[in-house]
């Protein structure tokens, strides 16, 4: 392209002083703590289209002219901004890593993706100070030129003008911070079975440490080319990388979402409605019919409760963890996807395709630095201060699932491998989904015993909802109408009452500005509910424990989150009632003993009710008694004895099968041999 700009610094000076004068004054006031002037490409294109085209085609030279103009701008403030930068943002076309091809070299492009890995911050020399040993003169050269063949550099002292010897003076050299990140294509940008491609991006100066793993970003940068490292010196393979000009962070933490004055007015008007919680509930996954209580719980999870820092240094988490357990095909995965789309930092993963390292962190060779061992963050740390959705939790390998214990409760990941010892923060709320072990639920068995998840992990969840797929003509008719409407009338179906962007800002505003406190009335309400449930079996030592202090903590978190959702600084009675109502639903679904109909915390925490525990002990004693002399007994003998003790045959067989699976006894050909004697 023919260069139509003869004096680029002057063109930039006219543009900056006419369009960005106020921004220049603000930069001069805070310099050197802030050293970048952000310029929108559309502003430049409207002011001087030729200069905008030149920027895209010859970015190195054009940006250097912009920097020269910025330094020389005549300002009324006494500030010499010799290290200031011009950062161009908002390029008209965004590319993916796979789109970079031959012909893009030395062009300015906008690359969109997700930050997968970052290197340590290092120092790099951009202008090397060289000292001549013959005359003592110090001058500056490009580092690459100094490393070239002998004779490439000559002393710049005209009285000397010799080819050395020289030595480097790093103290006087001009240096900048440098960091390399790996930009990977986001999952939502992939089609079919495409694997995500990645590109290395070099950040310098004040762009260093601007992003973290998990950030969705747009990198505006110059496409560069370099020789690939290879043991075969005859190979002439090259690869692209990006020299960043500016970084636009698309997804931040909730607290960093930008909210304008107009947005704040809309948020406060929405919060003033008496039915604000119902409106928010109807705006969550509107294409999915029903599940009102689950959607309210998801809204409470999005705002969560502030973490509580105790005087002894301990910290009580404020994030709310939810587990959806249900029959197949009832939209659990869609609920998880919607939640991660609303959260500014939402990570979705599936139990079938995630490992311990992918969930927590992996110790890998640093490809971006000097090859040392480094940590690569997994799903939980990448979702820090956001939502981590884990689908098909029951399909994970038990060893991989163990990694969730620390992450959910302590909200940290401890790693000690390859000489590295580190703790990564994962202050995120977990929204998980699981299916019954045998496809569908058996209503005669407790829920927690029908999913292949450790009881200790189940106890980490504040709420567990059970979703049954049962025929009901009236409900099925409404569901059919709702589903078919999405095909028949696409324009008017599944329209949320609150637009997703406004809902995201509403939640961000609540998390940033609202920290509700309990009133005496609400504290007493929560206490009375807890004591009321506990008093159900008061004075009956042989009876089950209906609920524990762990559920009380969850109850308080829900009540505070409810007040936060209304932007209220006080937790009022309606918040306590909402928390109690949701908790009661979960306790009845998961913590009910199907044989007695009463509440039993063991059904939640231990996947085994006290009734089943007592009957298991009784059958164990029967086996021990019958096998006392011979060392074995028959299946039929145990069943008959159990029936005589009041245990139904079906229940006795179920318990005996579990004892066999757990290894307490061995069954072969209808003969039972207790294994306890050999232990």
Image: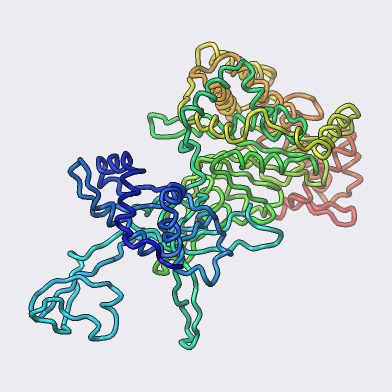
Residue 25, percent from left and from top: 27, 40
Residue 269, percent from left and from top: 55, 20
**Front in this rendered view, residue 146 or 39:** 39
Q: Identify the residue shown where x is 70% and y is 27%.
A: 293
Quadrant containing the C terminus in the rendered view: bottom right
Residue 55 visible in the displayed image: yes
Colouring convention used in this rendered image of the protein? rainbow
Residue 489 placement, left or right of 408: right
**Outermost residue, bottom side:** 234
Q: Identify the residue shown where x is 26% and y is 62%.
A: 175
Tally of marks? 0
Residue 107, percent from left and from top: 46, 65
- Look at the picture and state if 234 lies above or below 549: below
- Look at the picture and state if 566 lies above or below 20: above
Q: Identify the residue shown where x is 87% and y is 53%.
A: 671
Residue 614 visible in the displayed image: no
**Front in this rendered view, residue 186 or 96:** 96
**Front in this rendered view, residue 633 or 406:** 406
């Amino acid at each position: 392209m023919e260069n139509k700009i003869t004096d680029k610094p002057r063109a930039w000076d006219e543009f900056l002083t006419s369009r960005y004068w106020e921004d220049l004054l603000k930069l001069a006031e805070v310099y050197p703590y802030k050293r970048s002037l952000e310029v929108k490409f559309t502003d430049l294109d409207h002011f001087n289209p030729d200069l905008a085209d030149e920027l895209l085609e010859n970015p190195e030279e054009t940006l250097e002219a912009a920097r020269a103009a910025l330094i020389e701008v005549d300002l009324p403030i006494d500030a010499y901004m010799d290290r200031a930068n011009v950062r161009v943002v908002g390029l008209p076309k965004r590319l993916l890593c796979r789109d970079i091809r031959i012909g893009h070299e030395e062009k300015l492009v906008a690359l969109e993706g997700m930050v997968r890995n970052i290197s340590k911050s290092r120092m790099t020399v951009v202008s090397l100070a060289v000292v001549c040993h013959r005359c003592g003169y110090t001058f500056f050269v490009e580092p690459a030129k100094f490393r070239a063949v002998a004779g490439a550099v000559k002393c710049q002292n005209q009285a000397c003008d010799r080819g050395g010897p020289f030595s480097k003076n790093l103290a006087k050299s001009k240096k900048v911070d440098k960091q390399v990140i790996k930009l990977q294509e986001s999952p939502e940008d992939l089609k079919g079975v495409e694997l995500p491609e990645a590109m290395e991006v070099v950040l310098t100066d004040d762009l260093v440490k601007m992003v973290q793993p998990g950030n969705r970003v747009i990198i505006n940068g110059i496409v560069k080319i370099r020789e690939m490292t290879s043991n075969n010196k005859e190979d002439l393979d090259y690869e692209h990388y990006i020299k960043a000009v500016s970084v636009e962070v698309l997804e931040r933490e909730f607290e960093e979402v930008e909210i304008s004055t107009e947005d704040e007015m809309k948020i406060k008007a929405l919060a003033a409605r008496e039915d604000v919680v119902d409106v928010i509930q109807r705006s969550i996954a509107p294409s999915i019919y029903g599940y009102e209580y689950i959607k309210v719980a998801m809204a409470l999870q999005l705002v969560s409760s502030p973490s509580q820092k105790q005087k002894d240094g301990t910290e009580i988490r404020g994030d709310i963890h939810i587990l959806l357990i249900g029959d197949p095909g009832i939209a659990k995965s869609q609920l998880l996807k919607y939640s991660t789309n609303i959260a500014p930092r939402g990570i979705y993963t599936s139990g079938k395709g995630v490992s311990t390292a992918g969930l927590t962190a992996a110790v890998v060779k640093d490809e971006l630095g000097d090859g040392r061992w480094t940590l690569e963050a997994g799903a939980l740390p990448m979702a820090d201060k956001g939502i981590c959705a884990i689908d098909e939790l029951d399909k994970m390998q038990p060893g991989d699932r163990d990694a969730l214990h620390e992450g959910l409760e302590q909200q940290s990941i401890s790693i000690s491998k390859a000489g590295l010892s580190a703790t990564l923060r994962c202050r995120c709320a977990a929204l998980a989904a699981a299916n019954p072990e045998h496809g569908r639920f058996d209503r005669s068995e407790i829920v927690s015993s029908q999913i292949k998840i450790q009881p200790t992990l189940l106890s980490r969840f504040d709420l567990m909802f059970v979703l049954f797929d049962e025929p009901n003509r009236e409900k099925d008719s409404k569901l059919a109408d709702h589903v078919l409407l999405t095909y028949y009338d696409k324009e008017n179906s599944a329209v949320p009452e609150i637009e997703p962007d406004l809902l995201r800002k509403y939640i961000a505003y609540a998390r940033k500005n609202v920290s509700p406190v309990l009133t005496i009335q609400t504290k007493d309400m929560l206490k009375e509910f807890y004591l009321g449930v506990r008093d159900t079996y008061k004075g009956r030592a042989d009876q089950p424990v209906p609920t524990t202090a762990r559920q009380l903590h969850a109850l308080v978190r829900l009540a505070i989150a409810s007040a936060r959702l209304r932007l209220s600084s006080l937790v009022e009675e309606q918040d306590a009632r909402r928390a109690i109502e949701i908790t009661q639903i979960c306790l009845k679904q998961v913590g009910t003993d199907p044989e007695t109909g009463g509440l039993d915390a063991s059904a939640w925490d231990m996947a085994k009710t006290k009734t089943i525990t007592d009957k298991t002990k009784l059958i164990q004693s029967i086996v021990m008694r019958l096998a006392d002399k011979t060392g074995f007994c028959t299946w039929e003998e145990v069943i008959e004895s159990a029936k005589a003790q009041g245990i139904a045959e079906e229940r006795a067989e179920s318990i005996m099968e579990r004892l066999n699976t757990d290894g307490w006894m061995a069954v072969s050909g209808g003969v039972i041999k207790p294994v306890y004697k050999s232990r």
